[in-house]
Image: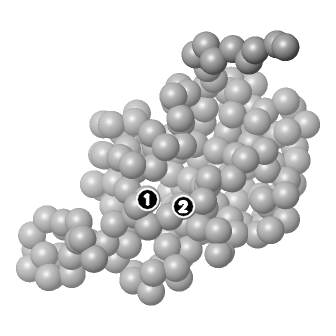
Amino acid sequence: MNEISTAEVNISQSVAILVDGNNIERSLHSETGNKNVMLNFDKIIPKLLDNRGLNRLVYFREGKKISSKLSERLHNYYHGSVRPCHKSADIPLSIKATQLANKVDTIIIMSGDSDFIELVRHLKGLGVRVEIASVQSTTSALLLEEADYFHPLAEEDWFSLSKSRRKSGGKPSASKD
């Protein structure tokens, strides 16, 4: 009888994480009923990477009001960037994913938007592993069918900003609701 080896496997994959900020924010607000909920990148990034290397982290956000603290935090801790989008993140995120396809092994798209189905098919056709990270209740079933893997975002992956601290001009703090 052959025995299965339990030797440790060293995975050396390069990963890009592309975040559709508006889609994820709307999903979190819908899931929680709280507009002050934000992703906890300190928890979610290591969970998504699962001992793989981070090549790029780009947070695409529609609109002019983009938190400078978010930009600084993503840059300082993950060498990430925030890209403002004129309208939706769909086209800029798709262009960046296509540009990165020959530079990474895996692209994780943080969005549940069915608009990314064709992008997922295209990237997989180029030999890129495509994973989706999103709130399951707001994620397109067709998108999940196309993806190689799904990371459901759960309550431990976000936090709520305290309203009283924000109104008083103090620093936002994580609430333990």
Q: Residue furthest right?
A: 125
1 up-or-down from 110: above or below: above
Three-letter residue code for mark 2: Leu
Q: Residue furthest bottom?
A: 33
Question: In the figure, is residue 65 to the left or right of 145?
Answer: left
Residue drawn at x 85%, y 53% as measured from the top left: 146
Residue drawn at x 18%, y 66% as measured from the top left: 173
Q: Are marks 2 and 1 in contact (CB under 8 Å)?
A: yes
Please tell me how many numbered marks the rendered image carries: 2
Distance from the alpha carbon under mark 2 to that under mark 1: 6 Å
How is the model colour-coded?
A: one colour
Q: Circle 2 is placed at which residue position?
A: 153
Q: Circle 1 is placed at which residue position?
A: 157
Q: Residue furthest front?
A: 1
Question: In the figure, is residue 32 to the left or right of 101?
Answer: left
Percent position of residue 174, x then y = 23, 66
76 up-or-down from 51: above or below: below
Q: Secondary structure at mark 1?
A: helix
Image quadrant for the C terminus? bottom left
Q: Secondary structure at mark 2?
A: loop
Residue drawn at x 75%, y 25% as measured from the top left: 102
Three-letter residue code for mark 1: Asp
Percent position of residue 107, x then y = 67, 39
Percent position of residue 153, x then y = 54, 61
